[in-house]
Amino acid sequence: MSAVLETRQLCKRFGALTVAENIDFRLEPGARHALIGPNGAGKTTFVNMLTGRLAPSSGRILLGGDDITEARQAARVQRGLGRTFQINTLFRSLSVLDNVALGIAEREGVAGRGWRAASSHHDIRDEAMALLATLGLADDAASRVLDLPYGKQRLVEIAIALGLKPRVLLLDEPAAGVPSVESERILQVLDALPAEIAILIIEHDMDLVFRFARRITVLVQGEVLVEGTPAEISGDRRVHEVYLGEQHHA
């Protein structure tokens, strides 16, 4: 089976400091994959190279078999690579509906007309409302993002990313800073996402990781330490030494 997203010998150096070293990674179609590792392992650097925010020092990135190593961020989105960003990228003073409509408008190429045009466009508005309904956010459509609890703001991010109709969805710590009751809702939403979307989550919440992921990659000091099923990862002595043991003591 061909990977929907793949990296080959991906490296990133900042001067003498190497933060990613020969990372070979494959995300299969429909994957439910987690990337874990201690702080400073290079997880964020890796994801920023996937999305085009950072250029790799060497190596290749393939999306659907096409080399996108040099592609701009917007071109990657158009090819089906979606991601959630930290909350400050949302238009916090706008409504939930307007935020999601903007994402859909970007996909349709009408975002340049401004957010009012996006949400007044009937097709876009209808699609945005349908998306909010599937994530349990329909009742919040008219609320300003800044008035929502943090967990719901994270769900709005996921709704915006889904509005881009991605083949691959990268979720950067979807449960970070979210109370456990709300992180349970995030897990339910992740479980209900379309099966054909390949999902990679970068997450510190090990409970969420082990409940969500079918495969886990452990990154340590910019290198892949091991990859396997949740059972294989939880039983791996090296992973406990460098990461899981540290989690239990935290």
Image (spheres, rainbow, N blue to C red):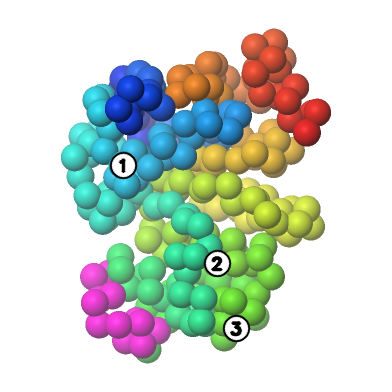
Please report the residue visible at 32 percent of the width from the left and 73 percent of the height from the top: 105
Above or below — where is 201 with respect to 3?
below
Give the quadrant of the C terminus: top right
The amino acid pointed to by label 2 is Val
Give yes or no for residue 154 being in the magenta stretch. Answer: no
Q: Which residue is mark 1?
A: 54
Mark 1 element type: loop
Residue 199 located left or right of residue 204: left
Please report the residue visible at 74 percent of the width from the left and 30 percent of the height from the top: 247
User: Mark 2 or mark 3, which is nearer the start of the sequence?
Assistant: 3
Mark 2 element type: helix
Please report the residue visible at 30 percent of the width from the left and 68 percent of the height from the top: 106
The amino acid pointed to by label 1 is Leu
The 10 Å Cα crowd at callout 3, few under 14, some 14 to 19, many 20 or more, is some
Above or below — where is 97 with respect to 26?
below
**Location of residue 37 by image quarter:** top right
User: Mark 1 or mark 3, which is nearer the start of the sequence?
Assistant: 1
Residue furthest out toward the top? 237
The label on residue 236 is none
Q: Which residue is mark 2?
A: 156
Give yes or no for residue 110 being in the magenta stretch. Answer: yes
